[in-house]
Image (cartoon, grey):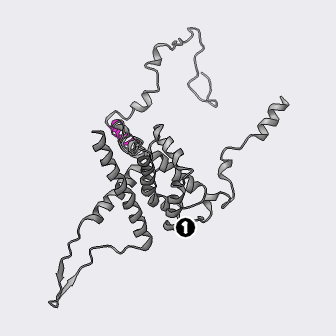
Amino acid sequence: MEDDAANFSDMPVPGQSLTGKLGEKAYERPPEKPTVDENLSFYVEGLLNPEIIPKLAANLDRGRTVSDFAEAVITSGVASGRHTIDVGVLVLPVVMEIVAYVGELYDVDYDMGLKAKSAESEDHFMEVAKKRMQDDETADSEEDDTSAFTDFMPEDESEDMPIEEEAPDAPAIPTTGLMGRGV
Amino acid sequence: MVLPVRRIYENAVVEYAKSKEPTAEKPTKMAHGGLMRTPTKQATTKSDSNLQKTFAYFLEKNVESRNNRKSTKA
């Protein structure tokens, strides 16, 4: 019991991860490489490194898509404080083409990851979510307003509830108030 | 996916295709009767041009090798 209490006091408070001081995280500080040019040369040199190229090609050969790889590279760059997300978005197409270029060098039948495999994943997931929300709203407006409450109610509670009958010998309730005189 | 990768990439390809198109520069007639050539190209910074050049370089290489690979496979 005491161990449980001790563990409970050691547990993180909900939202504790959001209470860090500003600037503690790498992405909260000014970026190490603020310009597009610096990041461009960093990614070109980094991805076309002779030690990295075979691993990259092996990843593509295993079925990893170019877009997934490029996104992972860019998001890790943002998280590590190398550059801002704006610069990352600008550099992303170049990173994709470099990764594809490595696939071409090794003659790998790679997938760019741009074609959706289903109609649902055709758009970005946020758009899918917005469309679903709109569909739900239109569906709700078409239904009766009370339907939202009746859905959670049992069909008819009155059938199951026993009806209490009044006792036959119950004394008559006086019609006058407390101050009134009894007849 | 966190980033809309497909859109970002497609926009970059569209920009590249636009930059390849020949720009038609039509002179506009001013009120005083003279002709003024309108700037059709947007002013690009050095980093923009480097970015576009690098993207165009790799894209052209990849498209070329993709086409060659298809022709050899077929």
The residue depicted at 40 percent of the width and 69 percent of the height is B49
Q: Can I make out residue B11 in this image?
A: no
Image quadrant assignment for residue A131:
top left
Is the stretch drawn in magenta largely helix, strand or loop? helix
Magenta span contains residue A134 = yes
Quadrant, the C terminus of chain B: top left
Residue A96 higher or lower than A36, as above or below: above
In terms of secondary structure, where does tag 1 sit?
loop
Q: Nearer the viewer, residue A64 or A162?
A: A64
Residue A169 higher or lower than A42, as above or below: above
Q: How many marks?
A: 1
Task: Name the kind of residue labelled 1 in the image.
Answer: Pro
Image quadrant assignment for residue B51:
bottom left
Residue A11 higher or lower than A164, as above or below: below
Q: Give residue B12's position: percent from left, percent from top.
A: 36, 58
Mark 1, Cα crowd under 10 Å, few <14 / some 14-19 / many 20+, is some
The residue singled out by tag 1 in the image is: A34
| Range of residues picked out in magenta | A132-141
The residue depicted at 46 percent of the width and 21 percent of the height is A154
Q: Nearer the viewer, residue A161 or B6?
A: B6
Q: Give residue B9's position: percent from left, percent from top.
A: 38, 54
